[in-house]
Amino acid sequence: MDNKFELLKEICKNHGVKLTYQKLEIFREIIKAKNHPSVEDIYNRVKVNMPTISIDTVYRSLNTFYSWGLISKVHIFCDKARFDSNTRLHHHMLCTECEKLWDFYWPEFYSIELPAEVKEWGNIEGQFVEIRGICRECLKESETSR
Amino acid sequence: MDNKFELLKEICKNHGVKLTYQKLEIFREIIKAKNHPSVEDIYNRVKVNMPTISIDTVYRSLNTFYSWGLISKVHIFCDKARFDSNTRLHHHMLCTECEKLWDFYWPEFYSIELPAEVKEWGNIEGQFVEIRGICRECLKESETSR
DNA sequence: ATCTTATTTAAGATTTATTCTTATTTAAGA
DNA sequence: TCTTAAATAAGAATAAATCTTAAATAAGAT
Ligand SMILES: [Mn+2]
Ligand SMILES: [Mn+2]
Ligand SMILES: [Zn+2]
Ligand SMILES: [Zn+2]
């Protein structure tokens, strides 16, 4: 029941971070939430019982939980775009260090069968793979700077 | 050589859209560009020969080219985030109509071998699949409204 | 239980990407 | 060349996220 809260308490302690009432309420809402809530969703829900909460605190807390692996984060709805004159069907590799983006092709990927729930979900218009990691160049740099 | 420009000219005509000097220069830069340029990158490059170009025109033109399938678009670098208390390794299905997001699991995906260029790219920290399309509910709605 | 202090917070300003508004310009057909 | 609907420039508006700073507070020390 409250073992998730016990975990939060322990992780805060391990990181030398204060467990404030704000963090507790934000955590309560995010673990209760379905459907990938936005920061504002969480803000509005916490505000019901805590009218003075500031949205900045919601941002900070959620990002802290994320950095501890307690929650995950998706960037699908954003408007910030980069363009690409490559219109061939392709996938991307993203270096989280230098933020460079590479194209790659993977025809074999299309030959594995999708899970049943996906096939029944609706009309599929595209299926893309995103690789995240640290590129060779950035790895080299962090080696030499050690 | 300039068959890409001929294509642009024809597509503009087919869509009843004026081929302005601005569109031509923006197109020239995007097909020349490597590494997924941002709108501002293109803006700065076009500005060299066209100092009065406005960034709004760059936005409009690139989105027009995108809607015609002449270029593609990625949304990887954005900060606009949604959170998820589901920390199990999972993938997403996104309905482009209602913008709802579903989780799905696909263990078999991890068993196919990645292309050599990916394995040699660097340290892979995660590999995710994104399915885009129209969900069953939205399909039903568009049926009944017809 | 009280004191102390480094963290955390609230509030509002700032930043940044994108879109909107409006007066002016222009491509392209007549 | 004329006409006009569409496109543009310039700058305002919007929205998500981050930053700044003074005040509040969690948690260890006394
Ligand atoms: Mn690409
Ligand atoms: Mn998810
Ligand atoms: Zn890198
Ligand atoms: Zn839908």
Image: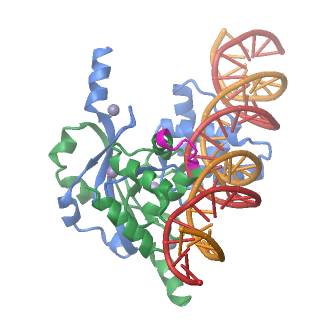
Chain colours: A green, B blue, C orange, D red
Which stretch is magenta? A48-55
Residue B140 figure quarter: top left
Assess whether residue B76 is covered by the magenta stretch.
Answer: no
Majority secondary structure of magenta residues: loop
**Residue occupying the point 51% across, 50% down:** A85
Assess whether residue A51 is covered by the magenta stretch.
Answer: yes
**Residue occupying the point 38% across, 46% down:** A36
**Residue occupying the point 51% across, 41% down:** A47
Instruction: Name the residue nearer the viewer: B81 or D6.
Output: B81
Instruction: Name the residue nearer the viewer: C8 or A145.
Output: C8
Residue B79 visible in the shown view: no
- Please give left or right for residue C19 compared with residue A38 in the image: right
Residue A26 visible in the shown view: yes
| Quadrant where the image shows the N terminus of chain A | bottom left
- Please give left or right for residue B26 compared with residue A27 in the image: right
Image coordinates for residue B135, horizontal then vertical, percent: 29, 34
**Residue occupying the point 23% across, 68% down:** B113
Image coordinates for residue A111, horizontal then vertical, percent: 19, 54
Residue B146 figure quarter: top left
Image coordinates for residue B124, horizontal then vertical, percent: 36, 71
